[in-house]
Image: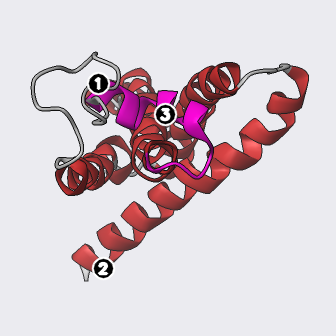
């Protein structure tokens, strides 16, 4: 039954990392103006990372679940799946080249730069479906790791506390 609990916590962490970040980020987006698609994508990168990291910190602080530190692995597998299914269209020789022979570079395909071709372009959809999931869960895991390092429970602390309780 321990694996059922872990699986449930992973699902909860993914849910918090994805939807919690969107909820936390929504009021902040209104305060930061973005007039071009590139500024919208840059704002999405920055706010997604910061909001997810804060949520990861809070989630670990409250739940003390090790799954929140490792939830990025699930998203990395998902991102890898996205790379594999889109490998046919990505130019195999360069990461940073723009369009070459009507093929799209890796960076353009997954960074959000492809959104200049329209929100319904395949590159833009890949950014929202694969990259954004990875950004949010990775930042969530980083926030959880920071909380795990900050709130490490030392056996010495418990020994000191229990000794002081016994003295009373």
Circle on res. 156: 1
Start and end of the magenta stretch?
106-122
Residue at 56% from the left image edge and 46% from the top image edge: 62
Q: Are marks 3 and 2 in contact (CB under 8 Å)?
A: no
Q: Secondary structure at mark 3?
A: helix
Give the CA separation, mark 3 to mark 2.
Answer: 39 Å
Give the CA separation, mark 3 to mark 1.
Answer: 54 Å
Identify whether 72 is placed above or below 54: below
Give the CA separation, mark 2 to mark 1.
Answer: 32 Å
Question: Please, which residue is most extreme toward the left here?
Answer: 93
Asked if the stretch drawn in magenta spans residue 90, the answer is no
Asked if the stretch drawn in magenta spans residue 111, the answer is yes
Residue at 62% from the left image edge and 42% from the top image edge: 118
Quadrant of the image occupied by residue 163: top left
Of the residues under marks 3 and 2, which one precedes in the sequence?
A: 2
Q: Position of residue 50 (x, y in %)?
A: 59, 25
Front-lying residue, 38 or 50: 38
Q: Position of residue 124 (x, y in %)?
A: 51, 43
Mark 2, residue position: 4
Q: Are marks 2 and 1 in contact (CB under 8 Å)?
A: no
Q: Is residue 66 left or right of residue 36?
A: left
Q: Secondary structure at mark 2?
A: helix
Front-lying residue, 18 or 84: 84
Residue at 54% from the left image edge and 60% from the top image edge: 15
Q: Are marks 3 and 1 in contact (CB under 8 Å)?
A: no
Count of numbered tags: 3
Of the residues under marks 3 and 1, which one precedes in the sequence?
A: 3
| Mark whose residue sits in front, 3 or 1 | 3
Q: Quadrant of the N terminus?
A: bottom left
Circle on res. 108: none
Question: Please, which residue is most extreme toward the front here?
Answer: 101
């Amino acid at each position: 039954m321990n694996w059922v609990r872990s699986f449930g916590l992973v699902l909860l962490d993914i849910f918090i990392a994805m939807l919690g970040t969107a909820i936390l980020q929504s009021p902040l987006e209104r305060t930061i103006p973005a007039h071009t698609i590139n500024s919208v994508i840059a704002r999405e990168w920055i706010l997604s990372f910061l909001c997810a990291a804060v949520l990861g910190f809070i989630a670990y602080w409250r739940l003390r679940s090790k799954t929140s530190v490792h939830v990025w692995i699930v998203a990395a597998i998902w991102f890898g799946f996205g790379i594999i299914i889109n490998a046919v269209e990505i130019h195999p020789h360069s990461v940073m080249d723009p369009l070459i022979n009507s093929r799209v570079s890796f960076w353009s395909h997954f960074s959000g730069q492809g959104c200049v071709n329209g929100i319904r372009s395949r590159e833009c959809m890949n950014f929202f479906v694969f990259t954004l999931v990875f950004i949010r869960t990775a930042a969530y895991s980083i926030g959880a790791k920071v909380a795990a390092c900050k709130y490490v429970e030392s056996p010495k602390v418990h020994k000191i506390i229990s000794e002081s309780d016994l003295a009373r």
